[in-house]
Amino acid sequence: MAPPDAAGSGRLATMIRVHSLEMVHRARAAHIGSSLSIADILAVLYDGVLNVDPKNPSDPGRDRLFLGKGHAAAALYAALAEAGFFPVEMLRTYCADGSRLAGHVTHAGVPGVEASFGSLGHGLPIACGNALALRGDGNPARVFAILSDGECDEGSTWEACLFAGSHGLGNLVAIVDYNRIQSLGRVEEVMDLEPLSDKWRAFGWAVVEVDGHDHAQLRAALAGPADAGGRPRCVLAHTVKGKGVSFMEDRLAWHYSTPSQEQLRQALDELGA
């Protein structure tokens, strides 16, 4: 596990954004807004929060990370490559025929990816099972699940939420990427989630609300020890879809749109790449 480095996590977040933009453009793919919104979360996790070893990705004592919002695969692949789990050059194969780097996060043959995700609502249930099993084995590893706000429309998410609270899974952390835009509209238009923090608390979770782009706030919320009282932790990360690229920020269109060559160049210029 690398030591924490505020400047390092900032550089990592920028590289995650740069790689994600280039990957999505090259593949003529989608979900760039979703990838950009979690870049800071991933950067902090892989800059000293997660107890993981790129040289031994199957270490039984490792922390587990599950990306329930699997459509943001580009960002996770970028974070893993920058962290040394596989060569950065492999990112160029994203979404190519026969590539291990599929458009929705895929674990087969990809070191550091714990499970494959596509349809929403599976991230937290699988994380709950892992957290319960690790505790039963006496393994002190922690389990993290990154969920989209749209994923909080899924009944399976709330069933898992109730399960975690009922079983006192203090080794579990759910991170909600609360960018308030899902595939077809703004969250309050599709399925209003408020009061979201109260809902998680009512299910027995300790809840922390943070600016999802502030690395100090994220690190404080994510790096703490497991809850002594056995409560799972929910980090509501208030984020901006498309964060870091002015013409993508808070725009519904960038859930599915692909940046053109000109738009890619403008985005990279804004990021200083």
Image (spheres, rainbow, N blue to C red):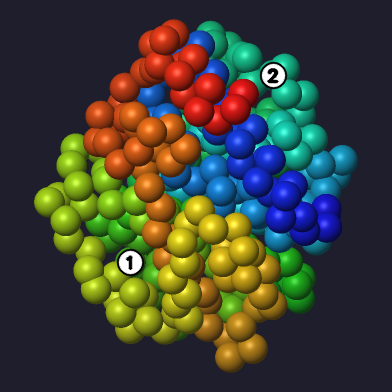
Q: Give the residue at mark 2.
A: 90
* Residue 158 - label: 1
**Residue at the spot 40% in from the left edge and 16% down from the top edge:** 263
Using the image as rendered, state which of residue 142 and residue 16 is in the foreground: 16
Residue 126 location, x and y as percent? 51, 56
Using the image as rendered, state which of residue 195 and residue 121 is in the foreground: 195
**Residue at the spot 77% in from the left edge and 55% down from the top edge:** 5
Q: Nearer the viewer, mark 1 or mark 2?
A: 2
Residue ranking furthest to the right: 55
In the image, what residue type sits under mark 2? Met
Q: Distance between the residues labelled 1 and 2?
A: 36 Å
Is the residue 34 above or below the residue 188 in the image? above
In the image, what residue type sits under mark 1? Trp
Quadrant including the C terminus: top right
> Is residue 60 in sight in this rendering?
no
Is the residue 270 above or below the residue 27 in the image? below
Circle 1: element type: helix
Residue 161 location, x and y as percent? 40, 70
Quadrant including the N terminus: bottom right
**Residue at the spot 28% in from the left edge and 52% down from the top edge:** 180
Using residue 166 as the reference point, say whether residue 273 is left or right of it: right
Is the residue 191 above or below the residue 17 in the image? below
* Residue 6 - label: none
Res. 159 image quadrant: bottom left
Using the image as rendered, state which of residue 117 and residue 43 is in the foreground: 43
The 10 Å Cα crowd at callout 1, few under 14, some 14 to 19, many 20 or more, is some
Circle 2: element type: helix
Residue ranking furthest to the bottom: 229
Residue ranking furthest to the left: 189
**Residue at the spot 59% in from the left edge and 79% down from the top edge:** 170
